[in-house]
Image (cartoon, rainbow, N blue to C red):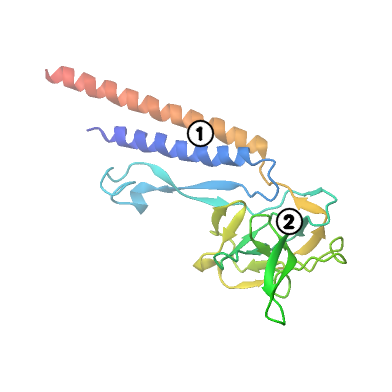
Amino acid sequence: MNLSFYTASVGAWQQQERLNVHGNNIANVNNYGFKAKRPVFSDLMYDYINGAQGDELPRGTGAYVVSADTDFSSNGYADTGRAMDYAINGDGFFALWDPATGDYSYTRDGSFIMSEYQIEGDDGQLESHWYLSDGFGRFVMGRNGRMVEVTDENREKELPVGIYDFVNTNGMENIGENRFVPVEKNGQLRVGAGTLLQGYLENSNVDLANELSKVIESQRSFTYALKMIQASDEIETTVNDLRS
């Protein structure tokens, strides 16, 4: 069969993947702390000899989306006036600890609340304390690497919220809810260089005008790929008619 069929089908498929990335960005344009994704394409002819899905498609069938890189640039801050809202001016993340799994994740979304957590007291009995959390059962880590306790005395003051960072943030895995986890190439955890802003939240860095233009571009490319399939079909039909 004509190779143009495969090239066009991969093109249409990957433009749909690209459209999904930009559509998700647009859906989160007003989501505090959201970081936009940027689709990255790779040439199938050079990188994947067996095609996009193993042996399903032949080699040399165009390009495909290898990843959706995260843009960690900042787009300003919103003044909320809430004492438990925090933003980071500069590089770094807030660290969240999930007591149910023991896992850590990292976010730029500082819309925190206080949640109850029980710890063992000096007498061996469980005591209830209140700590800064994201409202989903995960607790914010402080500058000392421990949970940030909230009391009647400090709840309106700036709490010692920790700022953490990595040598390289490219390729961090997005696990949803504006949270990221590091991969091997990100290196070791370190203290972030950013400064804490109380009473502010970081705006989404989605550029709506740019995203809308990319959506139109993807739709046009998708249409052209389908027209290529139609043209290839007409050529095949003509060839078959000549043979008969």
**Disc number for residue 180:** none
Report the Cα–Cα distance between label 2 and label 1. 37 Å
In the rendered image, the quadrant that contains the N terminus is top left
> Where 120 falls versus 95 (above or below)?
below
Left or right: 230 as drawn, with respect to 236: right
Q: In which quarter of the image is residue 210?
A: top right
Name the residue rendered at 64%, 61% in the picture.
138
Instruction: Give amino acid for label 2.
Output: Phe
**Disc number for residue 112:** 2
Q: Quadrant of residue 237?
A: top left
Q: Nearer the observer, disc 2 or disc 1?
A: 2
Specify few, some or many for label 1: CA neighbours under 10 Å numbering under 14, 14-19, or 20 or more: many
Percent coordinates x, y for residue 171 in the rendering: 53, 59
Percent coordinates x, y for residue 174 in the rendering: 55, 54
Percent coordinates x, y for residue 125 in the rendering: 69, 76
Left or right: 144 as drawn, with respect to 99: right
Q: How many marks?
A: 2
Specify few, some or many for label 2: CA neighbours under 10 Å numbering under 14, 14-19, or 20 or more: some
Mark 2 secondary-structure assignment:
loop
Mark 1 secondary-structure assignment:
helix
In the rendered image, the quadrant that contains the C terminus is top left
Percent coordinates x, y for residue 202 in the rendering: 74, 51
Please give the residue where the numbered disc 1 appears in the rendered image.
Answer: 218
Labels 2 & 1 near each other (Cβ < 8 A): no
> Where 102 falls versus 9 (above or below)?
below
